[in-house]
């Protein structure tokens, strides 16, 4: 149980203790005076009403202090970081109209399927990675960030994972020069969903190192392969380059982090991803105010004290 105002509780308990002390002291003095005068000392029953009244005042002091109970409440919640590859190869048209358009459509479908208590952020990645929308319960921001994505640059799967972890933790993350993994805490309710053709040019952080960091942080990475294994050519900076889906790195990332790999060659198949992402069941604390219950108990004690006093002495006090 937590107390909203410890100061009020302390004051109330001091007053209650003072009343109890005064009751004991004056009862003993009165008993001694009556005994000296040869008058029979009233039994304890006559003091029951007074003690019930003091107890009621003590309980009322607790109620005024704002007590609350922390109730564990399981629910599906967490953070989803949508990482979308915007490298030049995502302009390939082996899936219509092109890989990036298919990825954006699938990402929007994924976002639309999530409940309002899930925070969603967006990362666009090429040689590096840029957080275009930080995790928020306002899913419209994530949708707008997806709509703004355009093809540009190369590919770095590792940078995408590190940038996503930075957004999840709310602080900049960097891998040590010798590959040492920093301590970023434990975030088991977070998931990274990566839409990419899997072509990794090896720039920036290595994908295996970044995946190991995600695994250490308890963050699952689900990977979605965009494109076909047959591949096609794409025009990048005036050069015709062949590009095809590379599932190997995506399977490795998913396996390392406890996520799953989703191969897909069309928007229709990728659209099924929204229902296959499993949110984690987390326990969150819900504060339940208890002041009302304590007030009721205080009233019962005060009424019982008054009734006991009336029946034993014929007086209310």
Image (spheres, rainbow, N blue to C red):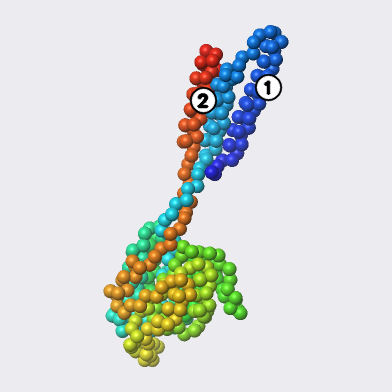
Above or below, 125 relative to 69: below
Quadrant of the rendering where the N terminus is positioned: top right
State the residue at coordinates (47%, 55%): 283
How far across and down, in percent of the image, does residue 254 sit? 44, 75
Total count of labels: 2
Helix, strand or loop at disc 1? helix
Above or below, 28 relative to 211: above
- Tell which residue pokes out farthest to the top in this image: 38
Question: Could you tell me if residue 127 is visible in this image?
Answer: yes
Helix, strand or loop at disc 2? helix
State the residue at coordinates (46%, 62%): 189
Quadrant of the rendering where the C terminus is positioned: top right
Question: Could you tell me if residue 83 is visible in this image?
Answer: no
Mark with earlier residue (1, 2)? 1
Residue at image mark 2: 302
Badge 2 density bin: few <14, some 14–19, many ≥20, Cα 10 Å: many
- Corner quadrant of residue 139: bottom left
How far across and down, in percent of the image, does residue 191 sit? 44, 67
- Corner quadrant of residue 197: bottom left
State the residue at coordinates (48%, 64%): 188
Residue at image mark 1: 25
In front: 316, or 133?
316
In front: 234, or 313?
313
């Amino acid at each position: 149980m937590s107390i909203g105002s410890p100061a009020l509780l302390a004051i109330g308990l001091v007053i209650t203790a003072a009343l109890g002390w005064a009751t004991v002291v004056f009862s003993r003095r009165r008993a001694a005076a009556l005994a000296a005068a040869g008058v029979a000392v009233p039994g304890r029953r006559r003091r029951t009403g007074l003690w019930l009244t003091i107890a009621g005042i003590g309980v009322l002091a607790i109620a005024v202090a704002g007590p609350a109970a922390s109730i564990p409440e399981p629910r599906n919640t967490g953070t989803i970081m949508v990482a979308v590859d915007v490298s030049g190869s995502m302009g390939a048209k082996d899936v219509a109209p092109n890989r990036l358009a298919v990825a954006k459509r699938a990402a929007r479908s994924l976002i639309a399927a999530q409940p309002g208590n899930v925070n969603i952020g967006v990362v666009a990645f090429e040689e590096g990675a840029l957080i275009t929308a930080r995790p928020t319960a306002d899913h419209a921001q994530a949708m707008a960030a997806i709509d703004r994505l355009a093809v540009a640059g190369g590919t770095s799967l590792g940078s995408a994972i590190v940038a996503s972890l930075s957004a999840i933790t709310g602080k900049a993350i960097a891998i040590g020069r010798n590959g040492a993994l920093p301590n970023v805490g434990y975030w088991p309710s977070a998931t990274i969903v990566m839409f990419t053709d899997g072509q990794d040019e090896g720039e920036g952080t290595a994908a295996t190192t970044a995946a190991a960091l995600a695994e250490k942080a308890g963050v699952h990475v689900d990977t979605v392969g965009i494109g076909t294994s047959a591949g096609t050519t794409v025009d990048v900076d005036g050069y015709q380059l062949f590009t095809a889906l590379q599932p190997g790195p995506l399977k490795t990332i998913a396996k390392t982090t406890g996520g799953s790999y989703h191969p897909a060659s069309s928007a229709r198949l990728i659209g099924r991803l929204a229902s296959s992402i499993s949110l984690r069941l987390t326990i969150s604390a819900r504060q339940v105010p208890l002041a009302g219950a304590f007030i009721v108990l205080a009233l019962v004690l005060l009424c019982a004290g008054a009734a006991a006093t009336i029946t034993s002495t014929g007086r209310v006090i």
